Amino acid sequence: MQIFLLDSLFSFEIFSFLSEFYLLFFIIILLLFCILLSESFLYSKVNTTLFGIKFSIYFFIFLFFILFNCYGFFENFNTAFLFEQNDFLFLLKIFLVLSSIFCFFMAVSYFRAEKIEFYEFSILFLLSFLGIFCLLSCTDLLSFYLSIELQSLSFYILASLKKDSSLSTEAGLTYFVLGAISSGFLLLGFSFIFGFSGLTNFQDIAVFGSLKEFSIKNSFLFYFEDPSISKNLIFYNFLLFEFFESYLSFEKFEISSLNSILQNFYGFSFFFELSRFFENDVQILSFFLLLGIFFSFIAIFFKLGMFPFHFWIPNVYEGVPTIITAIFSIIPKIGIFGIFLKLYFDFFIKFLVPSNPIFGIDSFFLEYLLIVSIFSIIFGSLGALYQTKIKRLYAYSAISHVGFMGAALSLNSFNGFFAFFFYLIVYVLLNINFFLIYINLRTFNNNLKIKKISDLQNLTKYNAVLGFCFMLNLFSMGGVPPLAGFFSKFFIFSGLLDESYFFASAIIIAFSVLGCFYYLRIVKILYYSRDDKTLILLPISKIDSFLIIFTTLLNLSLIFYPKFYMDCAFILTENLISNYSIENLHSLLYKI
Amino acid sequence: MLDFYLSYLNSFNFFELSNDSFFDFFDKDFIYFFIFFCYFVYCKKDNSLDSNIDFENASLFFEDSFFSYDFFSYLPWDSVSHGISGRMFGLLELEYPEQTSFLASLLLLPLFFMIVIVLINFREVEAIKEYSLLSSLIIFFYSLGLWLGFDNSISGFQYISSFIWSDYLGLSFTIGIDFIGLSFFVLTAALLPLCILSSWENIFYKQKEYFLLLLFIEFLLLNFFVVLDLVFFYIFFESVLIPMFILIVVWGSRERKIHAAFQFFLFTLFGSVFMILGIIYVQSELGSTDIQLFLNSKFSKEIQLFLWLTFFIPCAFKIPMFPFHIWLPEAHVEAPTSGSVLLAGVLLKLGTYGILRIILPAFDYANAFYTPLVFTFAILGIIYSSCTTIRQIDLKKIIAYSSVAHMNFVLIGLYSLNSIAISGSIFLMLSHGLVSSGLFLCVGILYDRYHTRLLKYYGGLVQFMPIFSVFFLFFSLANIGFPGTSSFIGELLIMVGAFDFNIFATILAGIGMITGACYAMWLYNRVVFWKLNFNFFTKFSDLNLREFYILFYLTLMIIITGFYPNPILDGFLLYTIDKVLIY
């Protein structure tokens, strides 16, 4: 790998990563500038926080255009490098940049109202953004871990932004501890993968996992399905020989030796029981490979908020400052789902399907994903019923939305990915709308935020248009026609029923109707309440009101002009499939 | 005869409750014009025969107006020559370049009027009210024009236009109209001016939002009766929930409205999700959700049984059929007057229209299979709701439960599966739309004056509200099914058809109608003829001109269709023979 890195210094491939370098450069410049500004006599006259945010907005607009200039997408790029770039990642990055611009507009109004002096906000957010960019571009276990840690560490600090609030600090600490544990599981998984294959590049692991037959004997005969990989035969041959040399004799392979080593290492006979299922050495390798991959799911599901690892979301979303909640719910969803798609649906799907004959252990990855998604929907819908605070209710509904997206992904077909991207686009739009409205709700007297749902009562009496936009947003999240949220759910049901998942779709439909109930309760509170009390709110700034109306119109416009959203989702799936999963392309296209 | 009637009108002293000058336009000459126009529309001849009206020189609609540029064609009978040039209709792409879209432009009219009302300042209530009334009347007249251009001799959908909604999914927003859809379309367009007139002085806050909501509901309902694609059918089936929920929550009369609105929304939503399963199954089998394709295809027996359930349950929630009817009394009572009128007049028909359009023509085996189930629940519904109406004390609840009984009667007619019963049930649907609306408007008039709906406070109204009593009597008799009113024809035909099918069921349904007479007459007696209690009544005013007009036009339509139903009924008979019973 070192050879390739030196080579790249003297070639123009570096221009593929123009956006990442520009981002890094800007972070350094902004950091220096903010430090110097805060130490200067202008400190009292300039709000460094807002300055940093506004500067970043301009930066993001530049970044949007710079992304279009990232050329140099070589086809063999991802075989040897730590990072890559292609059309699919480019589109995801565009999507991220556009959502971030909205997040920064929210941040301007938030920090202006809260009067917090924290110029590191922009820096940290941009660092996490750099982390997500690198995460999307990664092709190696090492770069994956580094990028995800860069993103997570920045988020841990952002979560405890308010140093004088114990709620915020507790939420940040919770997030940090649990996130560190999940990163630990990630590393454990990666260590299994590396330990049992000796490879870190995803492409190499995919090739390794798709081996049809190998026997560890003198002859080292390998058989690959794709003959073009045979040129790497000698390379892999050599690694495996090195790896197994210490455990094996050249004449005969004995399974008990490996098992006894493992027993001594772990101190119990767990693997002895499992050894009944292992008939040959390949299955041990496959077992640990799969185990490593499943451990790495923990980190992914933790960050997204999928079922077994969603318990941190209500506490953390409630505790952190509202702008950070907005960022937590929009940016990582796109990034982590992007890497999830890339990794598990291209590189690892080759040996995560039960149809792979030599692995005696069936891998139920897709069914597992569907079950996890269904439980996310159930727990998200049930959990939101008893909430009295807006952010906690929102957190539970975020869990359920992520469940829907996971259910769309479990279909592993063109329609499934299309439904997923459509849902993601609509979900991000609704979140931006929700937070633009919610962040701007502040009481007139004390400039306080609104925390409880009952504080929203009679909002339409105070500001009819705001209540109307909020109502449309909530109904859309609930999935009521003719709004955008209904179509995203409809496509998911359509995909599920095409694959004959009848029971799953019945459960999902039932719980989405249940989910509609708590949105309906908020709408009723917006429009009518028994006592006539209504909170007087601060007026919303011009640009925020424009953005609220703009996103509401986007929400409403889907019934009249769906081509826009469908084309976006279609382009994303098309590029996903053409840049990855080339072997599956033929079967995917005919599975529509 | 007319002069005598008009002089009687002029001699009576109306208490003017409103000081508008708007109604000066609607003086006695306008009545002539309106009666003539309605008669003209009602008795029009087939287009294939030589008619005695010269269409080409009739200039009811402007030819050189603002709207007659390339995109729209506003002339219904000349729709071929004024075609659309260009491939786009707004943002949507037309599927066939030479098609016209009079229907689509008519459907967009409520949205245009809504945009204008949005621009009016919320303080100018008079302007908002007048403008919304004008817009609803324009829509009504255009829908009559649709009827004029309709060709009764052709079976099949007319005014078809198709817009590509998504080429990736193969979904196209196809709209077209046949006689059933046309009659419901005109009914909706006719009821909305009455709704707007009835809320002229009821609504004390947020008038602008109220009238916007009414126009939006009209838009959704008009769309519902013309779509020819299952996905859009479902979308408009369910979209009405949002504005109705807000209507009940904001402008309802008492605390229980929240409970009613939640019940209405969640019941109907829960029922509707079954339709998603059916639509997706149809899409996977046939490849598209076009209704015309769906009606011409055959499904196997087991699949028919499954699909029938998925399409019938949402309709059953809306009809409302017996176990799922409990939302109706709540929602009708707690809604404001115009909300009740729309609910009873049109929203109940969404379910039966779904049965007519989707279930009856497409599933032959399943209809015959499930008929006993439907009959059981419908008869249970009739008898139960009629019996429970007798002990109600709230005026609106009585009428709401009688709506349940009427709609279950319609259901019996639909599932007798012969053309007489089906055409009778469609006729009863239309007449129920008029009669129930009239009854709710009457109760609304009483509520405007006395702000109570409890029976114990009312009595002896005839002594100072004689005109109201006449109208109320008329609507009560129509509710019972008195000969001379349109509901008699509907009920008679249904009885005849159901008798053909099953004698015992008809007898039981007839018992329901007898109890209908019981509660309706008793209600009328208690409200109008009992003794007047001066403790509760301090305001004595008969109908003013606005209320008179509302009730008058409804009674006129009921009498005319009761004595001369041929133009409508023939169309229904033809429709049932052509479309529904073609197995």
Image (tube, helix red, strand yellow):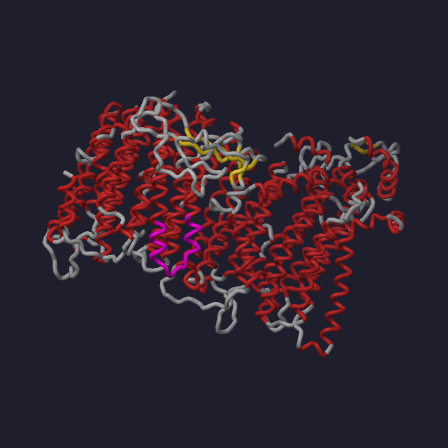
Q: Is residue A369 visible?
A: yes
Query: Residue B262: where, in percent of width, then height?
Result: 38, 51
Query: Residue B429: where, in percent of width, then height?
Result: 29, 35
- Between B67 and B404, the one lying in front of the other is B67
A152 is higher (above) or lower (below) than B476: below
What's the residue at 18%, 43% (across, down)?
B520
- Between A268 and A54, the one lying in front of the other is A54
Query: Residue A192: where, in percent of width, then height?
Result: 75, 48
- Give the quadrant of residue B503: top left
Examine the structure image and report whether residue B124 is included in the region drawn in magenta: yes
- Give the quadrant of residue A585: top right
Q: Which residue sits furthest bottom?
A: A41
A218 is higher (above) or lower (below) than A180: above
Magenta region: B113-132
Q: Which residue sits furthest top?
A: B583
A330 is higher (above) or lower (below) than A342: below
Q: Quadrant of the C terminus of chain A?
A: top right
Would you say A293 lies left or right of A246 here? Answer: left
Q: Is residue A188 visible?
A: no
- Between B312 and B52, the one lying in front of the other is B52
What's the residue at 47%, 44% (across, down)?
A481
Would you say A362 lies left or right of B371 here? Answer: right
- Between A271 and B277, the one lying in front of the other is B277
